[in-house]
Amino acid sequence: MPVKYGKFEMPDKIKLDEASQTNTFARFVIEPFERGFGHTVGNALRRIMLASLEAPAILSVRIEGVPHEYMAVEGIIQDMTHIILNFKGALLRKVILSEDAHPRDIRTVTKMLEITDEMLEKCGGAYKVTLKDLLSYSDFDIVNPDHHLFTVTKPMVKRVDLRIGSDRGYVPSERHVFERQVDEIVIDSCFSPVRLVNYYVENTRVGQDTDFDRLILEITTDGRVSPVEALTFAAQIGILHFQVFDLVKTHMVYFDKGEAQSNRDRDEILQKLALRINEIELSVRSTNCLANANIDTIGELVVMPESEMLRFRNFGKKSLTEIKQKLDELGLSLGMDLARFGINRDNIKTIIQNYNLEKLGNVEV
């Protein structure tokens, strides 16, 4: 049985503070919320953004001639421990995947790094290898292409293999799951693209009341996702997890939305109720049974309780199942309580007739 709740004040838009917006920072103002909902929504979004968003990161590094990370490399100033730390600072944007691609697919990028005498001379004898030298022709967008990896002082040709994947949160090297190659150095990976989320709740006015909530969200990312993308992804993740609680729904809750919204809802439901029975493609048997019961429209059908439908002559459970399925496709059901629209079993025919006449009157000739 439906339950009606009073109106909740809800924001009708999200304001983005464009004056302070950058590629990695944005400030959002959302109002009005009912008292207390600013903290409820703000904290939930903050936790999701910090812990549940995904982005690519380097999982392992393999440099030709380097068997492990605890050694120095001839012709390179930094030792391997320092180099591995630099690789952890690589920031990559996720490639646009096809619908068939798995989001956790691991890709290997191979680069033959060649440092010549001419390159060293131009740089004063020390060539700084950056992220773009290894990934400029890969399928990933590089957020920080000039990120320094190591400095070469002698001519060399080395093969460098990088294994790149997507996940969420911080994953230590021992938790990466893939078949490891000889001389492959697996590294810890930070997949979370959001660095900081602050939220504030202030009072705001609605009419004469000043105790409603204004939610202010300040989002800082590392560039692998934009702040707007972070908020978008977090909201959809939250909605996904709340959907599971539909399994325990025992009552349909209707909310008072104010006069304008109620009028729109009433128009939408009347469009469905005014459909004739022959417009929903029922079987001949079901159509004839409803015709014999003088039910001509969907509106007259949905106000009938299920138990009464079974009393009609030649009307069986098979026909009942078919009708319930068709009504479910329209978002309707048998025995609906339409009292909030001023509709009941006694006036349904009159209301549908008046609605059809009103439509005819609005048609331009």
Image (cartoon, helix red, strand yellow):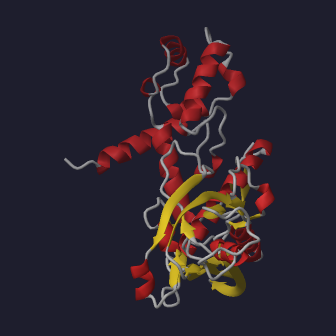
Q: How many marks?
A: 0
Residue 219 shows up from this direction: yes
Q: Position of residue 236 (x, y in %)?
A: 62, 59
Q: Pick whichever, 293 or 76, lies toward us.
A: 76
Q: Quadrant of the N terminus?
A: top right
- Relative side of 311 to 292, left or right: right
Residue occupying image coordinates x 62% and y 10% = 313
In this rendering, is residue 94 above or below 222?
Answer: above
Residue 209 shows up from this direction: no
In this rendering, is residue 126 above or below 229?
Answer: below
Q: Position of residue 167 (x, y in %)?
A: 67, 58
Q: Pick whichever, 51 or 81, lies toward us.
A: 81
Residue occupying image coordinates x 50% and y 58% = 95
Outermost residue to the left: 365
In this rendering, is residue 306 above or below 271?
Answer: above
In this rendering, is residue 71 above or below 160?
Answer: below
User: Image quadrant of residue 223?
Assistant: bottom right
User: Image quadrant of residue 211?
Assistant: bottom right
- Relative side of 207 to 128, left or right: right
Q: Pick whichever, 218 or 195, lies toward us.
A: 195
- Relative side of 286 to 48, left or right: left
Residue occupying image coordinates x 52% and y 11% = 285
Q: Position of residue 260 (x, y in %)?
A: 51, 64
Residue occupying image coordinates x 55% and y 68% = 92
- Relative side of 101 to 174, left or right: left
Q: Pick whichever, 57 or 199, lies toward us.
A: 57
